Amino acid sequence: MRRLALLLALLLPSCSAKEAAAPKAEQALYAGQGRDRLCLSGERAGLITYGAGDLNCSVSGTASRQGDRLVLVPTGDPACRIEASVAGSTLTLGARSPSCSFYCAPGADWAGKRFIRSPGQPAEARDLAGDPLC
């Protein structure tokens, strides 16, 4: 019985150390020019960018971070990959590929849009209808 108690006492700290070392999921809101927003909530992500009038691009999906790159993939559409470069608290979106055209109104685009990390919450990023993106 003492051996079992000693074994448990030795194993518990190692489990706690592994849990503490797990990376924390990012919860962030990024604000762009005007009403442009990008949100990250764990693996969930969303963005909305506006052009003239209310023409916009709007996407919700998942995001993964790979060093100084963020990749957003719309839900149910693995052919579309939206890449952003990360520099400190700034994200800059890359060019929109033809496979992502569905997510933008004619004349709207996200290419080159910049977002700066905001003190707000991800739930504050909303699409044109007012629904949360994250």
Image (spheres, rainbow, N blue to C red):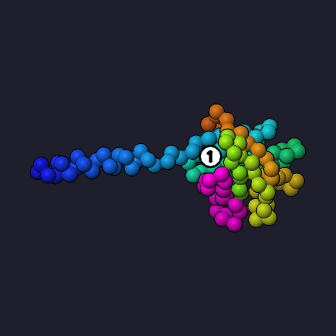
**Which residue has dot 1 on it?**
40
Q: Nearer the viewer, residue 57 or 114?
A: 114
Residue drawn where x is 11% and y is 51% of the image:
1
Foreground residue among 112 and 42: 112
Q: Position of residue 81 (x, y in %)?
A: 70, 61
Q: Is residue 5 left or right of residue 69?
A: left
* Residue 2 point in image, percent of width and height: 12, 49
x and y percent of residue 26 in the render? 57, 45
Q: Is residue 102 above or below residue 132?
A: below
As drawn, which residue projects farthest toward the top?
Answer: 119
State the extent of the magenta-drawn residues as a range.
64-81
Within-10-Å neighbours for mark 1: few <14, some 14–19, many 20+: many
Q: Which residue is the extreme one toward the left?
A: 1
Kindly state the secondary structure of the residue where label 1 is placed: strand
Image-based side of 60 in relation to 11, left or right? right
Name the residue: 67% across, 54% down. Answer: 69
Task: Tally the marks.
Answer: 1
Is residue 131 at all visible to an observer of this figure?
no
Magenta stretch: includes residue 78: yes
The residue positioned 17% from the left and 48% from the top of the image is 5
In the image, is 57 to the left or to the right of 74? right
- Whether 127 is among the magenta residues is no
Tag 1: amino acid: Leu
Image height of 111 relative to 31, above or below: below
Residue 11 seen in render: yes
- Residue at image location 62% in from the left, 36% down from the top: 121
Horizontal relation, residue 127 to residue 24: left or right: right
Where does the image place residue 55, in percent across and percent down from the top left? Answer: 84, 48
